[in-house]
Image (cartoon, helix red, strand yellow):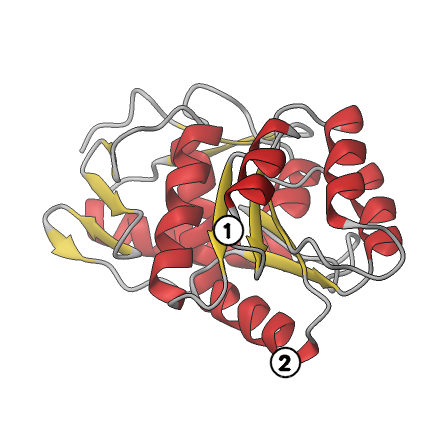
């Protein structure tokens, strides 16, 4: 899942970006409202973590702009403004959740997981498919009842496929939602990580759950025998 963090406190911004990346999310960071507006206009984010006190463009104005270009993206306001009026204003402006500073990172993680489950109409923390179980809260995967060790990118690829069962996911969509802005869209990063993920699943299950539709993308094989 791809997340944009908009926060003008540099230390906090770097901490949030790094913490969320450690949880297998693709994360872009931005410390300016106008720059954030440019990003959300061209990148399809799954979630925006938004501070209200921003240079360039106020957080409330940015939220309104976000809603004009993307009505579906989830927005979590993260602000030191803890008054009821600000919370109501933020939610009325289109935010999906509001978390006041200071906060524990574990709570932020839980809010992010909850919003992303809603983003993909997935209410259960456990994603299962033909012998594979992925726990979105613990960031753990089992295959054939045994723990499966994946890299962060392998986990993110598998999670995205599980959330899009029945669909062929293009390379462009993977690059948009699983990688952040630091990767070259022409690189072979997707192919390398996907090959490694398929190899691990094949070793654990004895079959290849992920199929390639040449020239289109990847999909989960509903008919694979496990």
Question: N-terminal of the two: label 1 or label 2?
Answer: 2
Residue 98 visible in this rendered orientation of the protein: yes
- Label 2 sits on residue: 11
Please give left or right for residue 116 compared with residue 42 in the image.
left
Q: Residue at x 65, y 36 (%)?
A: 173
Q: How many other residues sit within 10 Å of disc 1, few (<14), some (14-19) or many (≥20)?
A: some
Residue 187 to residue 77: above or below: below
| Circle 1: element type | helix
Residue pictured at 52% horizontal, 65% vertical: 21
User: Can residue 43 be seen?
Assistant: no
Q: Position of residue 144 (x, y in %)?
A: 13, 46
Q: Quadrant of residue 89?
A: top right
Front residue of this view, candidates 225 and 179: 179
Residue at (49% x, 57% y) in the render: 100
Query: Which quarter of the rendering shows the C terminus?
Result: top left
Q: Position of residue 50 (x, y in %)?
A: 64, 51
Residue 225 is labelled as none
Q: Are marks 1 and 2 in contact (CB under 8 Å)?
A: no
Q: Position of residue 35 (x, y in %)?
A: 86, 55
Q: Which residue is mark 1?
A: 194
């Amino acid at each position: 899942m791809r997340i944009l963090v908009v926060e003008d406190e540099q230390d906090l911004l770097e901490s949030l970006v790094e913490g969320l990346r450690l949880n297998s999310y693709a994360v872009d960071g931005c410390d300016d409202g106008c720059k954030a507006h440019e990003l959300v206009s061209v990148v399809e984010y799954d979630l925006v973590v938004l501070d209200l006190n921003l240079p360039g463009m106020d957080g409330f104005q940015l939220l309104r702009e976000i809603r004009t270009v993307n009505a579906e993206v989830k927005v979590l306001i993260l602000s030191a403004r803890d008054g009821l009026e600000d919370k109501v204003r933020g939610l009325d402006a289109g935010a999906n959740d509001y978390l006041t500073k200071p906060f524990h990172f574990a709570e932020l993680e839980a809010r992010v997981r909850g919003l992303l489950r809603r983003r993909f109409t997935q209410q259960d923390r456990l994603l299962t498919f033909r012998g594979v179980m992925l726990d979105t809260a613990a960031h753990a995967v089992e295959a054939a009842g045994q723990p499966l060790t994946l890299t962060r990118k392998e986990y993110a690829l598998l999670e995205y496929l599980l959330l899009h069962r029945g669909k062929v996911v293009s390379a462009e969509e993977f690059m948009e939602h699983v990688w952040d802005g630091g990767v070259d869209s022409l690189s072979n990063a997707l192919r390398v990580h996907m090959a490694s993920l398929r190899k691990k699943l094949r070793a654990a299950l004895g079959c290849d759950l992920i199929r390639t539709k040449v020239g289109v993308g990847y999909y989960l094989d509903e008919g694979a025998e496990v």
